[in-house]
Amino acid sequence: MKVLVLSSLFPNAVQRRHGIFIEHRLAHTLSPADEARVIAPVPWFPFAGERWGRYGEMARVAARENRRGLQIEHPRYPVVPKVGQTIGPMLMAASLYGPLRRLRRTFDFDVIDAYYLYPDGVAAAWLAKRFDRPLVMSALGTDVSLIPHWAPSRAMILDAVRQSSATTAVCGALVDALAEMGAPPEKLHVVEHGVDLELFVPPVNRSATRARQGFDGPTVLSVGHLIERKGHDFAIRAIAEMPGVRLVIAGDGPCEGALRQLAQSQGVADRVRFLGHVDQADLPDLYGGSDVTVLCSDREGIANVLLESIACGTPLVATPVWGSPDVVRVPEAGVLAADRSDEAIRSALQTLLGNLPDRVATRRYAERYDWAETGRQHRALLQRAVAEHRRS
């Protein structure tokens, strides 16, 4: 089977953790007999300097690269301010038509495997029809929880789902939301994320790990980009009334200054530690040394943080949004906050810190999220799409 992966979220040498779960899923989806190529479009921007922020970062992405044996192309597509939400999928599709046409001369793909429904999935649907190939799409989070609030985007997403051979989502809540919008239920499938159970493991000697990290006393970890929707501010305010509890924040982003000011104003600057960006290889020690990982997001599909933490034996406090209740549903996994408020998050932290589960049991629960099973389910959908298309 020859698989063409299409997603603007695929990681690259500049944005190393950008959609890394897609790379993991693909690695476990393909059999030794399969082949894959990746088309990972990047918005066009003329200047590559750091002063241009996120757009400058995108401009530094190479046109082609090879990651772990996969050939990846990064075609540029135009992004038009103000009207981009309306015409974004069309601009992406038009920009990708030429690269796909050239690719087919040497790689005549059997199926398009698209991640993120808008604009990527909508563009992939147009291309799949143009090249007469079946389409499997995957919904990841905000492409269902946020973007469809705008009626034209919702209509385009539903058209793409109807055209697809199958559309997956990482949690049941996203599938339910798509069905409520009018997507055909028979097209929809839950295929949960997995976690690297060989990288994310409990520490052999937790006391030594805590000593290396400089952790002293009850320690809460918050991992993620320093942006508003991740809710690190809720964690800061929550521990402000929990004497002796320390908060470690791993991640970088535009809200760092505001978060540092908040910690100062709350009187907890000495109990909140900012680590900046942390490489994936260094995360297991952080999870393993922490007592609790907290995720205060306002929307998530299934966050990598949740699965990585429990794989390291560290239980969770999470806000009750989208896929998080699917993970935090047993005591071994942690405690689900009643809502996204300072009081509810503080209460959940106090409850969990007062009665921490056995870390071995937490790890055992995490082992159900095996990438191999995720890959098996996804590959079966791709195979079915190819077989049905050949019969039609």
Image (cartoon, helix red, strand yellow):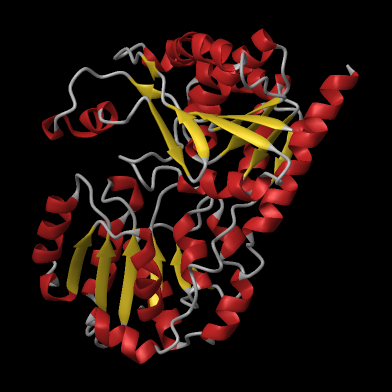
Is 172 displayed left or right of 216 in the figure?
Answer: right
Is 238 displayed left or right of 192 in the figure?
Answer: left
The C terminus: image quadrant: top right
Specify the farthest residue to the front: 106
Towards the viewer: 171 or 371: 371
Is 122 displayed left or right of 146 in the figure?
Answer: right
Give residue 54's quadrant in the image.
top left
Measuring from the top left, give residue 264's x and y in whole percent.
9, 65
Q: Looking at the image, can residue 70 be seen?
A: yes
Give residue 318's quadrant in the image.
bottom left
Measuring from the top left, give residue 77's x and y in whole percent.
39, 15
Measuring from the top left, give residue 345's x and y in whole percent.
38, 67
Residue at position x 48%, y 79% in the image: 202
Measuring from the top left, give residue 320's x and y in whole percent.
50, 57
Say above or below: 158 vs 12: above
Specify the farthest residue to the right: 391
- The number of numbered badges drawn on the structure is 0
Say above or below: 216 vs 147: below
The N terminus: image quadrant: top right
Towards the viewer: 247 or 104: 104
Give residue 234's quadrant in the image.
bottom left
Q: Looking at the image, can residue 344 be seen?
A: no
Say above or below: 382 vs 373: above
Residue at position x 67%, y 39% in the image: 168
Is 262 displayed left or right of 126 in the figure?
Answer: left
Residue at position x 34%, y 91% in the image: 207
Towards the viewer: 55 or 5: 5
Towards the viewer: 308 or 354: 308
Residue at position x 63%, y 18% in the image: 125
